[in-house]
Image: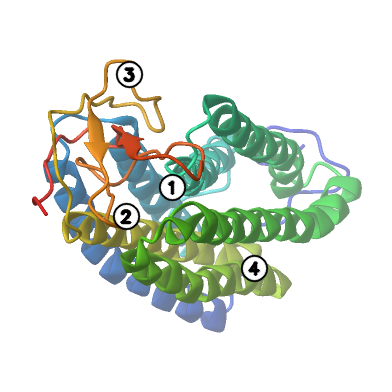
Amino acid sequence: MSITGFKTEEPFQELIVTPGDLTLGSIVFGFFFGFALHVTWTAVQETRRAPRFSAYVFMIWLEIAADIGIAVLGWLYLAKKIPPSVGLFTSLVFFWVCQVQCLMLIIANRLCILYSDERQRRILRFTTAGIVTVISFSTACIWIPAQLQINHTYIWLNHWWDRFEKSVYLLLDLTLNILFIRVVKTRLINYGLTKYDRVMKFNEYIIFVSISMDILLLGVTALHNGFVYCMFHPVVYIVKLQIEMTLSRLIIKVAHSTGISITGRVPTDAISGARTRPNSMQVPVNGTQVLPTQHADNFELPEPRPRDKYFSGMSYLSGASSAGPSA
């Protein structure tokens, strides 16, 4: 019988932590909290900008809370401050599921702002959520028994499943970011919105950083101490969250800096990617400069048609209602 109360093939062996493991884990832990302070301040600014507590804001704070939860529990276990238990491993998996789900949905919703077809947005969201849910559930069913050392099969399977799961998230992240660049080029820049070149180029740069984080996480699975590897999880995801919020702010800056002629107030919706209401006001084109009149985190464009003279009103992720400058 193991110390965790589960029957195992062999006596439960406590985690072996060398001085080098603890030093590396502590360095990663310290870097996380230092960077988390900056990310938290950015999240406060995002929350203040939103007139109400939207799904986007909720996911930001849940992501931060999940990152902190993993970092604290992981370091306490690594430092032998808390014993192994079902509650500890279940809590870590819960925080990890929240961490991955929130970040992937934030990335997917960034892409949804450029789709005017509700069906396309729904497919993108549900596909992303479905992939993450299946992988998360499978990981939980493998990782917890492996940590409890139920048998060698779970331990062996967890060793390879970790690498497979990280590879899937790397490809999913890469796919969503490449789709975003493609849509920006075809739906915005082709309309003559050259100021969106900044968004496109910036996103191309941060794709490298974001994918590098995924590769780093995949690489540290080779560490002999699994909980030192776990300490890298919150670091990677807090950096990726900062990337998403930075890109969101850049979109807003570009939108507000482009001349538009506003003919009326455009209604908003707090739900990310919501369709524009039928009675939304129309925003006429001034030359080639056409941009949304509200919070740029969640606007939508009409399907490309050569003879279009007007763009429909757009709704934004945080539900903000702010008119841009007149042309």
Quick check: marks 1 and 4 in contact, CB under 8 Å? Answer: no
Sequence-first tag of 3 and 4: 4
* Residue indicated by mark 2: 248
Q: Is residue 154 left or right of residue 233?
A: right
Q: Is 251 located above or below residue 206 in the figure? A: above
Quick check: marks 3 and 1 in contact, CB under 8 Å? Answer: no
x and y, in percent, of residue 272 in the image:
38, 32
Sequence-first tag of 4 and 2: 4
Helix, strand or loop at label 1? It is helix
Q: Is residue 207 left or right of residue 224?
A: left
Sequence-first tag of 1 and 2: 1
x and y, in percent, of residue 82 in the image:
46, 51
Residue placed at 35% from the left, 26% from the top?
271
Residue 19: image tag: none
Mark 1 Cα-neighbour bin, 10 Å: few <14, some 14–19, many ≥20:
many
Q: Between marks 3 and 2, how big is the CA–CA gap?
A: 23 Å
Q: Between marks 3 and 1, how big is the CA–CA gap?
A: 20 Å
* Residue indicated by mark 4: 16
Quick check: marks 1 and 2 in contact, CB under 8 Å? Answer: yes
x and y, in percent, of residue 171 in the image:
70, 59
Q: Quadrant of the N terminus?
A: top right
Mark 2 Cα-neighbour bin, 10 Å: few <14, some 14–19, many ≥20:
some
Sequence-first tag of 3 and 2: 2
Helix, strand or loop at label 4? It is loop
Quick check: marks 3 and 4 in contact, CB under 8 Å? Answer: no
x and y, in percent, of residue 164 in the image:
79, 56
